[in-house]
Amino acid sequence: MTVIQLYFMRHGQTLMNQKGLVQGVGEGWLNNIGVQQAQSAAWNLRQQQLHFDLAFSSPRQRARQTAQIVLAATQPDLKLQTLPSLGEVNFGHYEGQRERQMFAEVIQHRHLNAQTLTQYIQKVGTAAFLQELVDAIWQLDLQTAENYQQVVRRMQAALKKIINQAQEQAGTKVLVVSHGLSLMILLATLTPHIQLPITGLDNVSCSQVNFVDGIWQIETINQQLGEEKQV
């Protein structure tokens, strides 16, 4: 029985993250905090003595930079492969706008109550709410924004390619650096009733998922790797 361990990491913080701006297909480097987060993540991975056989990232600058910092400090000889299908959700005309404004319009569009939104998400589940969220953004945009099924299809296509390559090369540990919402959606499709954080995945958090004989097993979700080193 071969177990393929996938470590899904969200990129480090960017200036747009820090300012609360919507960042999907838009580019942007890590800010100083994001660089420090990636360096701390690399240190924590070394402490765990993790040795990756393959490494993939989204082509977006913030994801590539995070992966490059991690690999430079842990496995500088390991080639980083970029997959366009690992990119973040396309938010259409909301790109670069205030996240707060986008969510306010989504809440109004879905006839939800902002004061009881947390309770609503707890009732329907984070995975179900993700679909409502992405499809509402798509309906409000109707130009370039992606809908939920489009994101699911491309993320699953990326995952299939990663698994196939791991099987061909007998790789058992794979690093995948991507984005918060895309990773949440991917994780939600792997196993029913998955418990995802309501506030989303933290920067440079790591979610470990094992692929065992065609079955997905969730090991950790949103594990903190970017915290300050303890010496």
Image (spheres, grey):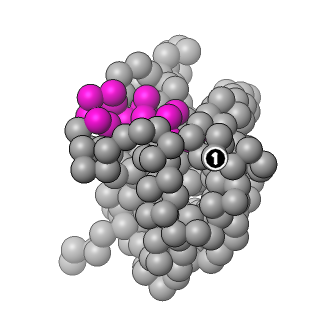
Q: Is residue 89 visible?
A: yes
| In the displayed structure image, the side of residue 19 where residue 151 appears, left or right | right
| In the displayed structure image, the side of residue 89 where residue 17 appears, left or right | left
Q: Quadrant of residue 202?
A: bottom left
Residue that mark 1 sits on = 140
Residue 46 lies, in percent from the top left, at: 41, 62
Span colored in magenta: 120-134
Q: Residue at x 33, y 27 (%)?
A: 124
Residue 167 lies, in percent from the top left, at: 67, 27
Q: Quadrant of residue 68?
A: bottom right
46 up-or-down from 157: above or below: below
Magenta stretch secondary structure, dominant: helix
199 up-or-down from 77: above or below: above
Residue lying furthest bottom = 32
Q: Residue at x 46, y 38 (%)?
A: 110
Q: Residue at x 50, y 43 (%)?
A: 109
In depth, the one of 10 and 128 nearer the eye is 128
Q: Amino acid at mark 1?
A: Leu
Q: Is residue 8 visible?
A: no
Q: Residues within 10 Å of mark 1 (few under 14, many from 20)?
A: some
In depth, the one of 140 and 223 nearer the eye is 140
Quarter of the figure with the C terminus: bottom left
In depth, the one of 148 and 153 nearer the eye is 148
| In the displayed structure image, the side of residue 36 where residue 47 appears, left or right | left
Residue 215 lies, in percent from the top left, at: 49, 16
Secondary structure state at the residue bearing disc 1: helix
In depth, the one of 195 and 139 nearer the eye is 139
